[in-house]
Amino acid sequence: MNSLQTSSAPSVAVSDGPRHLAEHTTARVGGPAGDWIVAETEGQALEVLAAHPLPDDETRAAGEDSLLVLGGGSNLLVADAGFGGTVLQLAFEGIAEETDGTSSDDAGSRLVRIAAGHRWDDVVAWTVRHRLAGLEALSGIPGAAGATPVQNVGAYGAEIAQTLVDLRAWDREAGELVTLDAEALAFGYRESVLKRTTLHGSPRYVVLSLRLRLAHDGEDTLSAPIRYAELARTLGLDPALEEERRRAPLDQVREQVLALRAGKGMVLDADDHDTWSTGSFFTNPIVPADMAAGLPEEAPRFPLDDWRVKLSAAWLIDHAGCGRGFGAELTDGRASLSTKHTLAITNRGPAGTGDLLAVAGAVREKVHARFGLDLHPEPVIIGAEVAAPGSR
Ligand SMILES: Cc1cc2nc3c(=O)[nH]c(=O)nc-3n(C[C@H](O)[C@H](O)[C@H](O)COP(=O)(O)OP(=O)(O)OC[C@H]3O[C@@H](n4cnc5c(N)ncnc54)[C@H](O)[C@@H]3O)c2cc1C
C-alpha cells in the first residue's frame, strides 16, 4: 500500500497494483478498477469524497462518474472491462449505544449508531447478543451496514426502514455533511431517496453511519412481530395469533432465518456456487390490480392497496420456463439460475459479468413473452446492462 498524496492530510491508503471487482463482489465477477482506496476511517472517506464532487447529470447519465462507492459488493455488478475511476471501499467499523436526551431507555428501546463499513450480519448478531429487537429477521444478508438503507433491505417480513431513525451522509452535490431522517429518506419497497438519486451507480449521498432504534425489554426481550408465514411456522407460532403477539426469542428467530436462507442459497458459502450471486436478481413487480387479474389464478399476489399488487418474481420466472439451473446452456455452464432458487443468477465457475447478464436477459425475455411483464434488476449494474425484452 502507498499513500495517496493530496493537499489535505490525513493521507489515505491506495492500492499498489490493479484490483479487480471480481475479488470484491459476491458474484465474483467484474474487471479491474483504475484506483482503489480503502477508507479505514470516516475522516479518510471524507477526504476522498471531498475530492470527488458529484459530476453533472450528463456525465452521470453516461456512466462516467469517476467514483464508485463499495461496501461488501453483494448488490453490485461491474462490467468485465472494469471501472476506470476510483473505487472507494468503506471499511470503517463500529457499533455504539447513544442517547438522544429522551427517556428512550425507560420506554423500552435503545438507540444504536453503526458505522457504514460494519459487516451487516455482525451488526445483527451483536443486537441479538445485546437483547435488542428489530433486526433479527434480517440475519444473513451479506454486505455492509451503510448500504442497507440504499435499497431498504428486507427479508422475512422485516426491512431496515422499520428501525432506522436517521443517517449521516456526505452530500456530493452540496459538498457537505447531512443528516437524513427516515421521512426524508422516503423508503419504499427496495427503494429510498439514496437509490433514487443514484444514477448508473453514481450516488449523490454517501452513507457514513446509521442510527437505529431497537426494542429492549431486559434479558427476555422477544423479537419484533413475525410477519412472514413461513418463518412463523418454523418457529412453531400459532398462525391464528394476532400479529402483535407473534413473537419469539431473538436467537431462535436468527437461527431459523439463517436456516431458511441457507436452504435457498441465500447465505454466503464459498463452497456453494448457488451463493455466488447478488441474491435476488429481479425485484418483485408491482403492477396495477387489473393487470394482475389477467395472470393465472395460482400466481401468488400480495395486494398493496386498492390499485396495486405485488407479484412474485420467482414464481413468474419459474412459470415462464426458467426453472432452477436455467441458463447454463447459454453460457457453456459458466452461469445459470441457482439450483435452489429461481431468483438468483449464479456464477458456476469462471463466469464473467457478461455471462450473468446473458442469463438475466434470457429470463427477462421469457417472462415478458409469457406474461407481458418486464422484470427489473435489483443489483446496481455499472458499465453494462441487461437486454430489454424484444431487443435481442
Ligand atoms: C446471497 C445474497 C443474499 C441477499 N439477500 C438479500 C435480502 O434478503 N434482502 C435484501 O434486501 N438484499 C439482499 N441481498 C443484496 C445485498 O446483500 C444488499 O442489498 C446489501 O445491503 C448490499 O450491501 P453491500 O455493502 O454489499 O453493497 P454494495 O454491493 O457494495 O453496493 C451496492 C450499491 O450501494 C452503493 N453503496 C454501498 N455502500 C454505500 C454507502 N455507504 N453509501 C451510499 N451508497 C452505497 C454502491 O455504490 C452500490 O451502488 C443479498 C445478496 C446476496 C449475495
Image (tube, grey):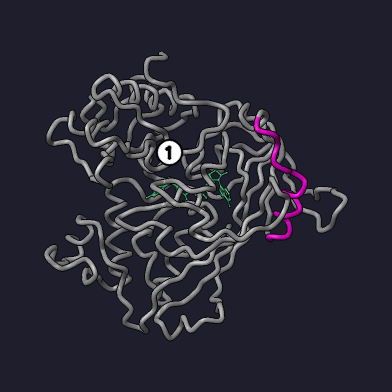
**Relative image position of residue 133 (x, y in whole percent):** 37, 71
Q: Residue furthest front?
A: 306
> Ligand 1 closer than 8 Å to the CB at disc 1?
yes
What residue sits 27% from the left and 40% below the top? 307
Q: Which residues are magenta?
A: 41-57
Quadrant where the image shows the C terminus: top left
Say whether residue 52 is magenta: yes
Q: Residue furthest right?
A: 7
State the residue at coordinates (28%, 23%): 372
Q: Nearer the viewer, residue 286 or 87?
A: 286
Q: Secondary structure at mark 1?
A: loop
Residue at mark 1: 378
For the point 42% across and 40% down, the residue is 276
Residue 241, x across and y down, in percent: 15, 68
Question: Is 212 positioned to the left or the right of 248 in the image?
Answer: right
The structure residue drawn at horizontal position 20% and vertical position 29%, both measured from the top left corner, is 319
Residue 326 sits in quarter: top left
Q: Position of residue 338 (x, y in %)?
A: 32, 36
Image mark count? 1
What is the x, y in percent for residue 384?
Answer: 53, 26
